[in-house]
Amino acid sequence: MNTETPDTPPSTLHLLSCLRHEPAKDKAARLHEISPSDWPFILTEADRHEVAPLLYFAVKPHARNLSISLDLMTAMRRKYLIAVARNLHLFQELSSLLNEFNRERIPVVLLKGAHLAGEVYDDMGLRNMCDIDLLVRRADLMRVEQLLLSRGADPEDRQRVIGSDNKHFGYQLAESGLRVEIHWALVTGDSCKIEWEETESRLRHIAINSVPALALCPEDLLLHLCLHAAGHLNALHVRMLCDMVAVGQKYGTELDWPGLVARAEIWGASRAAYVMLRLARERLGAPLAADWIEALRTEDMEEEVVSSVAGRFFNAPHLAPPDLSIGMARFRTARGLKARMKYLATRVFVSPEIMAFKYGAPSHSWRILLFYPARLMDLWRRHGRFLGQTMFGGRKTQAAANRISKKSQDTDKLRDWLLSRVS
């Protein structure tokens, strides 16, 4: 089986070669095939895919024998050192936060970057982080909020209400500006809702700067990474697959594959796990068992699905006009004035729960109705100047709108299918 895509640019193919998990001798042979003129484009791709520190780590042992300039190696090293400095700062803030949670006897699970950089990767500088994600019990949310507010944290949502389509609240710490996401669920959706209790019996004890914390077991971590990637098909980065490679390197021999496959079925994650883990293995050499990945394959899985997801990871992004968002594209491609007005109405008259998040009025109060005119004005301020261009733009605008709208609709269908339970 082949997951290569014909539209993948050479710079991305070279980047995948650099990052591939393989013996040093094979790595050296691959790197020698790269010409001097290719390296600047590879570094640009590494930045786009958020893996510049990993590129430096992969290339450094072979640099003396490669046709790569000293200036470029210096630039790679600088990006790595910046990641180290940023993560040191983030982990210092995280340690302080964990100490307070521990004093209040509030158990906390580290998710995604905090877990990966702090425990899974051999070097914390290899995994870029921009915020901290924590999982807590739903019953502890009020206590967590009180603790964060006492530290001067600024909530991102004015009215924090647990709804059917949200799974976390965001806060920005006052002094450091650090963004913290407090999750009460790993996944929320029609097919499955995975909260603390589903993972509790398998949680592991770890430490960040000697401060005790909790983390998902390796199998749950892999499944969460797969589900997270499947939920972000509009913003896939090679870094997501590199995370799966790192989990395989760290825990490969101790992974409970029968348990992972069974849990994937329970969680409705079989499709997402099969596609993501297969891509990680085939394109980056992830040390993950091929036969067990194949055991995740559902009867309705087609190669076209794998190729579609691979294309979203590796193909060059289509450049669209800067003022043509997905929403504007869907508005432009709606057929007729009635369809366009209907689409605008769905954007203005969103659910009371969403209005509560944005404007702070109680979602079950009649007063929420008073904020819809404010929402209309907000949308006009943000998008009004582009509306005329979108409605009356020429053929290039129409072609871009058609492409963006179709891709968005295809992405929505693919994401829903990957995250749905197999019937």
Image (cartoon, grey):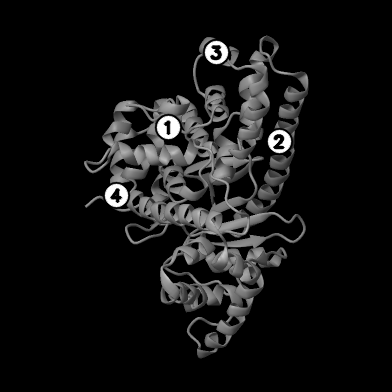
Q: Please, is residue 59 above or below residue 309 in the view?
A: above
Q: Please, is residue 289 above or below residue 184 in the view?
A: above
Q: Which residue is mark 1?
A: 5
Q: Which residue is mark 2?
A: 84
- Quarter holding residue 159: bottom right
Distance from the alpha carbon under mark 4 to that under mark 1: 31 Å
Distance from the alpha carbon under mark 3 to that under mark 4: 39 Å
Instruction: Name the mark nearer the viewer: 1 or 2.
Output: 1
Task: Return the residue nearer the eye: 364 or 46.
Answer: 46
Distance from the alpha carbon under mark 1 to that under mark 2: 33 Å
Indicate which disc, 2 or 4, sits on the residue closer to the N terminus.
2
Q: Which residue is mark 4?
A: 266
Image location (x, y in percent) of residue 359: 60, 77
Q: How many marks?
A: 4
Left or right, 33 with reference to 172: left
Binning the other alpha carbons within 10 Å of mark 1 as few (below 14), some (14 to 19) or many (20 upward) gives: some
Image location (x, y in percent) of residue 7: 47, 33
Left or right, 307 with reference to 329: left
Name which residue type carries label 4. Ile
Q: Which residue sits at x=29%, y=27%?
A: 291
Q: Secondary structure at mark 2?
A: helix
Query: Which residue is outermost to the bottom?
Result: 366
Indicate which disc, 1 or 2, sits on the residue closer to the N terminus.
1
Name which residue type carries label 1. Thr
Q: Which residue sits at x=52%, y=76%?
A: 348
Binning the other alpha carbons within 10 Å of mark 4 as few (below 14), some (14 to 19) or many (20 upward) gives: some
